[in-house]
Image: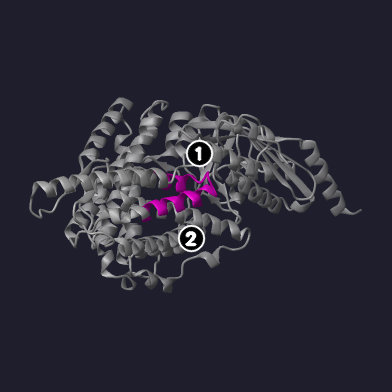
Amino acid sequence: MNYRFLAALLLVLSTLASGLTSMAVPAVTTDGQGIVTTIEARVQPGSGGVFVDVEPFISVETQNSAKVAAQQAAQKAGVDLKKYDVFFKIIANTEVVDGPSGGHALALLAYAEFTGKKPRTDMTATGTIESTGAIGQVGGILEKVQASQKTGIKLVLIPLGQSIQNGVDLAQYAENQWSMQVVESKSFEESIEYTFTPNGERINVTPRLEPPLNLYSVADAQTSEVDTLKALAEDQVRKMQANLQAVQPDTIIAHVLRQGLNTSNTLISNGYYYSAANEAFITNIQAQAFGLSNLSKQDLLARVDQLENQMNAYRFAAPTNQNLEWLAGARLRWYWAQQRVQDIRERSALAENALSLTEDLAAAQNWFDAAKEMNQAATELGGSAVNPNAWKTYAETRVAQANQTVSQNPLDSESIFHLDTAQIALDQGDYLTASFDASFAIAFSKARGLIATRGELPLNPLLPKRDDLSQFQETAWGQLYYAHALYSVQEAERLDDVTHVVNAIKLKVLAEELQTNLNQLHVRENDSAPQDLPTSAPDGSVQITVQNAGFTPNAFLGAVLVIVLVVLVGFLVAYTQKPQPLSKTQRIDLLEQRLLEGKISEKTYEKLNQKYGGKTPRKKR
């Protein structure tokens, strides 16, 4: 008897008999609320097609995730994907289903269909699925777990390293509050092992031992310009030490702080100053969020009001030829803090309690603290005053470039965040900050494009090289972010985590864009004389410093006329040249493109076409 033929026949029959496999999968809506969607999967003999129907919307990231999910599922099931077609349907009670965070669940559902096995019905999963089989990190873990428990789910699989949320051990919290088990999964193989256990069975998780952190030093490859951030990183470490002394030594948050201290100190000693500051920054946010976890929503919002008042009253140093990078760093973090505050206000109306808002408040406070420290560094650097109006045309061009780059991938939330803050800064006449934040948006969109063009090919050719750090000595932030990219490469090797590979590529491109941006600012900083120098405060108020060149009535009248003329011309230029966010018509055009590419269904297109003001449904040609 041909047993291989019989096994293949049984696989086909079991696949056809299974008909449909479904799973309740958590997601986060565009307003930050956790919901539970339904994902269905079906596999049938075919030619390797992977099809996704999402109600009401599908993004490119979701489409790519489905493809990788099907490939990984077929590989683990031992079948040839080219002989099957895979159909996914995602039903969500929200306007937009975006991002790759459903890839983990898609892969498990496809595997179930390929093998004929049934997943347990009291479990769900969130996370990306990578071409290596790794489960990548995603946002909104707390909101997703909270939404899951309301539907009776007893097991949630989350990516490795994400059980600590808002300074709380989510695995322990879910166990105590909801009798739910939250389990970290590093790989698709692990997730398969957990998913096909009996309903109600507890998962025995083996403690993970991470390899030690061994780094090569980059301290000697950087200039003294990065010493400012080294000092800031050391300040963040001292803050961590203070936070550690304020908590009980045997708590989970104490463990997080000790781990953060060890990592940050190792990074500082090896010259990874931004990496150290970032590690300390994130750890301090966790600690502060933990301290806020018992606040009522009313008390938390009162603290938000207090923080916002402090931020609106703050003033920054004037730009000079020496302090541009640190002044831009300060202003950027001020805007990012303001965005966090805005997010809290928008989400608080629907939040059940303060827990899901504490990390945002802690982040906003720490962004503002970092802004003040960098502004102090900018003040101490001194230098010759420059006229920020010299950057107006360049900043408008830079933001327009960012708008164009992001529009090629309009659902990339990280790039959109930086594009939005760049536009806000531009609207307020803060041309320095606008150009820098536009560089973030451009870099992240470019990096996504580079990664996408690789397809299933290895990403190694895109990674930063150790010897190339010396190419960024013209700019402090270029050196700092490129060093951070090199650290991400080493973390990817240590932890076998593709998330760090993606971060390394993004940081490499960011270093390149920031160096280009700074060079362009220096080229233009002397395009006009610094007399009558306007400096915009981040809140939009304008302070004018006028150099005294003698006073006559005629001179005064002439100055008034010149000012009026400049204001009128500036208004006309801003009105005609200011780059605008995507209009409804542009969004409809992008939807039509997705429809023609077969990435959304007619039904999905008609819904969103109507939402954006389309009068008649456009038909697929």
Q: Report the Cα–Cα distance between label 2 and label 1.
A: 31 Å
Q: Quadrant of residue 290?
A: top left
Q: Which mark is residue 583?
A: 1
Give the residue type that dot 1 points to: Ser
Quarter-wise, where is residue 387 in the image?
Answer: bottom left
Tag 2 secondary structure: helix
Residue 586 rendering spot, x and y as whole percentages = 55, 41
Residue drawn at x 85%, y 47% as measured from the top left: 9
Q: Is residue 291 above or below residue 11?
A: above
Q: Position of residue 614 (x, y in %)?
A: 60, 31
- Return the disc, 2 or 1, that comes first in the chain's sequence: 2
Residue nearer the viewer, 455 or 385: 385
Q: Which is the main secondary structure of the residues drawn in magenta?
A: helix
Is 32 rendered above or below residue 520?
Answer: above
- Was residue 333 drawn as part of the magenta stretch in this picture? no
Q: Bin the neighbour count of mark 1 within 10 Å (Cα to Cα): few under 14, some 14-19, many 20 and up.
A: few
Q: Is residue 254 visible?
A: no
Please identify, in this view, whether the residue under mark 2 or under mark 1 is nearer the observer: 1
The kind of residue tagged 2 is Ile
State yes or no: residue 404 in magenta.
Answer: yes
The stretch of residues the image draws in magenta is: 394-420
Asked whether, in this view, residue 132 is left or right of residue 621, the answer is left
Rendered residue at 27%/47% (across/down) = 566
Q: From the top left corner, tell me how far across and down residue 327 is, in percent.
A: 26, 54
Q: Is 585 left or right of 237, judged from the image as shown?
A: right
Q: Tell me whether circle 2 and circle 1 mark residues in contact (CB < 8 Å).
A: no
Q: Which residue is mark 2?
A: 505
